[in-house]
Amino acid sequence: MADNLLEIDNLSVDFQLPNGTVSAVKDVSFSIQPGETLALVGESGSGKSVSSTAAMRLLPELARTSGAIRFKGEDLLSATPKRMRRIRGNAISMIFQEPMTSLNPLQRIGRQIAEVLEKHLGLNGRQARPKVIELLEQVGIPEPSRRIDSYPYELSGGQRQRVMIAMALACEPELLIADEPTTALDVTVQAQILALLKDLQARYGMAILFITHDLGIVRHFADRVCVMRHGELVESGTTGEVFGNPRHAYTRMLIDADPHGRKAPVDTTMPMLLEAKDLRVRFALKKRLFRASEYFEAVRGIDLSIRRGQTVGIVGESGSGKSTLGRALLRLLKSRGEIRFDGSDIAALDTGSMRPLRSRMQVVFQDPFGSLSPRMTVGEVISEGLRVHHPEFNRRQREAQVIEALEEVALDPAMRNRYPHEFSGGQRQRIAIARALVLKPEFLLLDEPTSALDRSVQVTVIDLLRNLQQKHDLTYLFISHDLSVVRALADTVLVMKEGQVVEQGTTEEIFAQPRERYTQELMRAAFVDDAA
Amino acid sequence: MLTYTLKRLLMAIPTLLIVITISFFLMRVAPGGPFDGERQLPPEIEANLKAAYHLDEPLPQQYLRYMGNLLQGDFGPSFKYKDFSVTELIAQGFPVSLEIGGLAILLALLIGLPLGIIAALRRNSGVDYTVMGTALAGIAVPNFVIAPILALVFGVLLAWLPAGGWNGGALPNLVLPVIALSIQQIAYIARMMRASMIEVLGSHYIRTARAKGLSERQVIWRHAIRPALLPVTSYLGPAIAGIITGSVVIEQIFGIPGIGRYFVQAALNRDYTLVMGTVVFYGALIVLMNLLVDLLYSALDPQIRYDD
């Protein structure tokens, strides 16, 4: 087809690493027509980002590329570096997943956008400025003529992504490559950015290559879909075809990967395990010599009660105070108000008196890469709590407990002598769960335990958590920004915003009939209604 | 910014007070005194001397007297250099130390930064290995080893430059001590700049800069060097302090009349007031350098604003 804007033809990318060659992309072909949106979908390691980065010729030097990438008929793989620089940021531009770190922190945003105009259109700084203000206005930055002189740190993640978009659109590109542009953003912000991209696409008539793992977005956003797995293209077609009649088993699995099932309800006569009254947490903003003079109240008077065997889901966007609340409940942060655990007041206990309780209340954190010490074997990580809480155990007893905990989370106990970096994200999260379980806790704080995982892995971790809960009669406080995960796990849900509970109720009530506008907005932005 | 600076200067007062107090009492705990020499002084003369310098008073009283004088800017007289006050000696010696130290740090930056940048850009190449290997050697060899070797080779064997002496600060006399002082700093700065440059080059905003279509040269000059300078900047405070205290040894070896030399001799001679004077002076200098570096840091990094 002559009218293809971008043609990727039998593209293969190998990385030559010291310990051998890794094929990231194998014989992939697809094309984009002017003005259309093509979604490249896949889980981590599928090669979707590598393929698109190859089109910009921005892969690291150790990558070996073969095949052809043609942009309006011109082979980009054999283009000179100088020619590539004329194309980048001009005819093809790119936005990335990490809005927080993709802008130079030491330069004003106006300068960074103007740079593209100077480079490709030959404008000088003074000529570029009105154009930059116009761009900022188009991407919805308030007060653009003042914001033009802001530094990136003065903007929120969503605003930074808008700046990236302004930069990408400065020269009115024919193709915009968007590599997971909304993954790091809150759902309501994500919805805004997607609407903005659609709007700008209509205005400029550019094509968008949209890379994502999120099928909810694809369904609403793309004209055509390519599904990638392990570096290969497994299926492609129009969005309607792929979602309506997925041919490949992997595609079906991805579409089906929204967490299913509901939690079995709990007897309402069960005693309360954890209760909080008027819980408040504040952080010092400015510090005078000895005491803080200004505070930010992250949790503003929250009441909460969890029965034995129950799961309470806390939903909210970043900055809503949900993690702070969780940590305060476990007395990992200083707070004011009442906290009762198993009937006794723990709010005033000192560190020493809290310690025996710690084995009864455990935590699993979001980041499966950062929360396990890289210098300890998995066995050491899991048994460390036993050394503290059960000093009477000898080596063999500890070993037996570690093996039991690993079997519990469906990992091979023989792997206990390996280090965390040898495991995948999903496996690490299982290790983190085993570490918590080994102490036989009654209460588990799960702080976004599935957010860093691929959808298909998420499903298995959620099943595991549900099974463990039933088997050991565990009580969960489940914190997440992901509504579909909460729906699959929680008995009751608290929706938080700016440190306060906006709405609460049983999971069914909240999902079927959200009363508050904010909750409705969250649901709409997360596309949870279509999964039902 | 101004309030911040004033606040930092105020905070320096307790720091200096602690330094002064500890050194005052440590000095007195050390055996011997300023008038012990090879020749035993007649007891009545020694008593007169002690009385003249108030050394016969109880220690707490001497301490209070010293602090009182210090508040009025009086460091007292030197016990050994009889006709000079400590203030005069420092005023004489400091410009010399400052000249050598300042030149050394300038040289270290001028050579160390480019070396680090080049090594980072040519990572894992012959150039990189050569620069980093040499730098490691530069760190490993202390300057009291380098200095005599330099003096021996260039001063004595080749006789290109004077092996020592000050000669009123003539250029040939400066060369060897400045080089000896800067070698270690060149090595540190090059290594640090390489590491931070490599980190910056791998960052997301460098990827953004490349995606804009900038040339490698533009990417490096406009987006990489300034962020990479930040860690080096925060090292400069301790480095400058290190260079000036390090010059104690260098000044001794090359026979340069800086304050470092007074410091060593004063300590050996139990010249109480001179030791105290140099300690206070060094302390104040280090505090000041750190403040300057922090202010420089805020000029480089807009996220650091000292407005409170």
Image (cartoon, coloured by chain):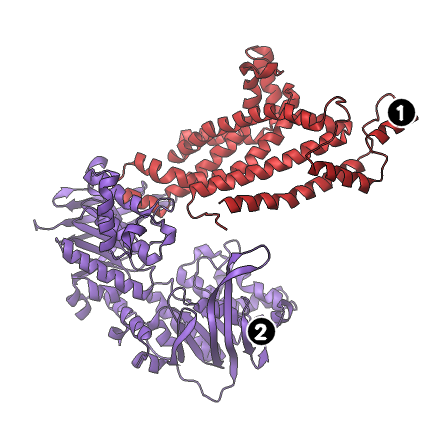
Chain colours: A purple, B red
Q: Position of residue B207 (x, y in %)?
A: 32, 45
Q: Amino acid at mark 2?
A: Ala
Q: Are marks 2 and 1 in contact (CB under 8 Å)?
A: no
Dot 1 falls on a residue whose secondary structure is helix
- Name the chain letter of the residue that bears numbered label 2: A
The answer to whether B225 appears left or right of A292 in the picture is left
Q: Residues within 10 Å of mark 2 (few under 14, many from 20)?
A: many
Q: Residues within 10 Å of mark 1 (few under 14, many from 20)?
A: few
User: Which residue is at 34% across, 54% downward?
Assistant: A98
Q: Is residue B47 visible?
A: yes
Q: Position of residue A8 (x, y in %)?
A: 18, 49
Q: Amino acid at mark 1?
A: Ile
Q: CA distance from mark 2 to mark 1?
A: 73 Å
The answer to whether B71 appears left or right of A159 in the picture is right
The answer to whether B293 appears left or right of A173 in the picture is right
User: Which residue is at 15% across, 53% downward?
Assistant: A204
Please give the residue where the numbered disc 2 appears in the rendered image. Answer: A347
Image-quadrant location for residue A194? bottom left
User: Which residue is at 59% across, 11% downward?
Assistant: B157
Q: Is residue A441 above or below residue A227?
A: below
Please give the residue where the numbered disc 1 appears in the rendered image. Answer: B45
Furthest toward the left, the residue is A2
